[in-house]
Amino acid sequence: MADLSDEGFDDWPVGSGRTGSTWDLALAADEQHAMEVLAQTLRVTANPLGRTQLAVLLLGQVPADLLKTAVIHLRQLLRRDFVGMLPMEVATNILEYLPVQDIVRSASLVSRRWRAVATQACLWRRLFLRRGWRVDADRWAFYSSLPRGICPARVMLDSSVLRVSNALSLASTPNGISALLEHPPATPRQTLDSVLGEISKSYMPQRVLKQRQFISSSSSEASSRSSSPTSSPQLRSPALAIDWRMLYAEYERLEGNWRLGRCRVDRWESAHAESIYCLQFDQHNRLFSGSRDTTVKVWHLADSASQITQLATLRGHTGSVLTLQADDAVLVTGSSDATVCVWDLCTYTRTHCLHHADAVLSLRFNTKWLVTACKDRLVRVWRRDNSYKDMFELHGHDVAVNAVHLYGDMLVSASGDRSIKVWDLERRTCVLTLADHVRGVACIDFDGRFIVSGSSDRSIRIWSLDSRRCERTIHNAHSDLVRTVMFNRTMDIIVSGSYDESIKIWRFSTGALLHKIKNVHTSRVFKLMFDRSRIVSCSHDRSISIIDFAANLPHARMLV
């Protein structure tokens, strides 16, 4: 008989004498009667210990060649399918403590009941969240509601799809989608504006609503495209149903891509007319870039493909745009013309213009503060809650302040004087000075507990505010000035860019080099930013590059 033990199936060997659930021992009638009397005696014996002793005495009389068969039978009696006996909720809680590979390769193959437990959504949700992973629920809700067959990457670019995606938000109201399709507005801009009010009343999240506000379409064909209710695409339910098992598998593959350096590099030449000094992208797929050509450009960064499409060009500076930051509604830019401009992203208009005495090299803001760093050695702090009317200065650096980073009321500044200072903005005082670099500090990143800095001494240093000292130094991280750095402790990743034209990925916990990404830029790297799935960078070569670790993972952009 073939060995089926590797398929989760067990059988009695040929000749064991087992047929069904009884042994075929060919007993005589009187012997069979004696056996039945003995079995009845065992059953009526009240004391379990007495029954056990009697059974042991009987086994002592069994010949050795048949004792093995008896033991096999007893082993079958001792087996219990606890997963099959327990409620589903309890069974999933038990399987949660198994390694994931055992759940997939072993537990799910035991039986249909085990497989049903091993594929429960609640089990995979707990496993997913236990790893510290998160899903952008707003983005998932939006893309899961798209009509089937529509590419998410084109949702915000094609005007006809834009009109359908806006109409989706009306699906939860009676006849909402039909009314819009029967009476299409005259222009794409009117299409967008006419449904914004309705979107805010539907299930669409507020962050997605704001995404609609900055998207515009230049196509003149949208006004001529109309659909009847009978030909409108079948809409998916707006309910948020997440396939946690699938997302877990994609997250594992995505982390493997980072670990093994599997990525695709796409580069857009001549994104600006001159060098690109700064950039930022956000969860709405907006990409902002500032250049020596004095302009700021707003791009749409596609989800399902490494593709960027220009949405707007902002003009207001007379010098190079050296630094910028944006949130949902506001963009702030700093320039070598000694000004800081605040822009409304709904209208692309400048609302405020703040002044320094020299070039603005870095800025950061949150809901409370706007902090600007200047070549004149000063850090200026503006309160945002009163239209930037209140301002105070922080003095302490000896030369230009190259970079600042903000976390709540804590500010970190880095200077060419080789020092990093930590400030308490409420008290307006410096609470800590860090000074291990041997040359000027060019860039920093800060998450509230750790600071990562890059310097013209070609090193990267990791500082802890808990210990108030440098925890780790990566010497000779690059062969030239380290111009830009960013880290993510959850991913255990540091990414750095340098004047040596390279971008490198490091392990945060150890400082070990994971990868050096090749063929990204042909000149100095000025700025980079990354999320779970890609790195976006800009350079003196006037290009914007995307290093995509999720090129073949369709849901990776949902992961945060």
Image (cartoon, grey):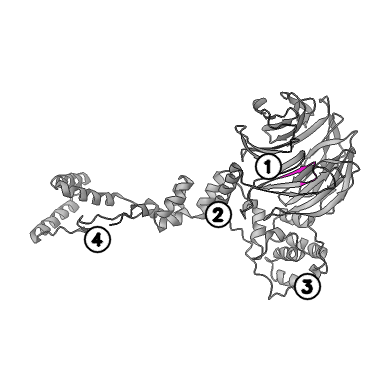
Q: CA distance from mark 1 to mark 3?
A: 52 Å
Q: Give the residue number, with chain letter if any, for mark 1.
A: 518
Q: Earlier in the sequence, mark 2 or mark 1?
A: 2
Element type at marker 1? loop
> Which residue occupies 70% across, 39% down?
503
Q: Is residue 86 magenta?
A: no
The amino acid type found where label 2 is placed reads Met
Residue 393: % across, % down? 85, 30
Circle 1 packing at 10 Å, graded few (<14), some (14-19), many (20+), is: few
Circle 2 packing at 10 Å, graded few (<14), some (14-19), many (20+), is: few
Q: Which residues are magenta?
A: 536-543
Q: Is residue 512 left or right of residue 70?
A: right
> Which residue occupies 83% across, 53% down?
312
The amino acid type found where label 4 is placed reads Gly
Q: Earlier in the sequence, mark 4 or mark 2?
A: 4
Q: Give the residue number, with chain letter if any, for mark 2.
A: 246
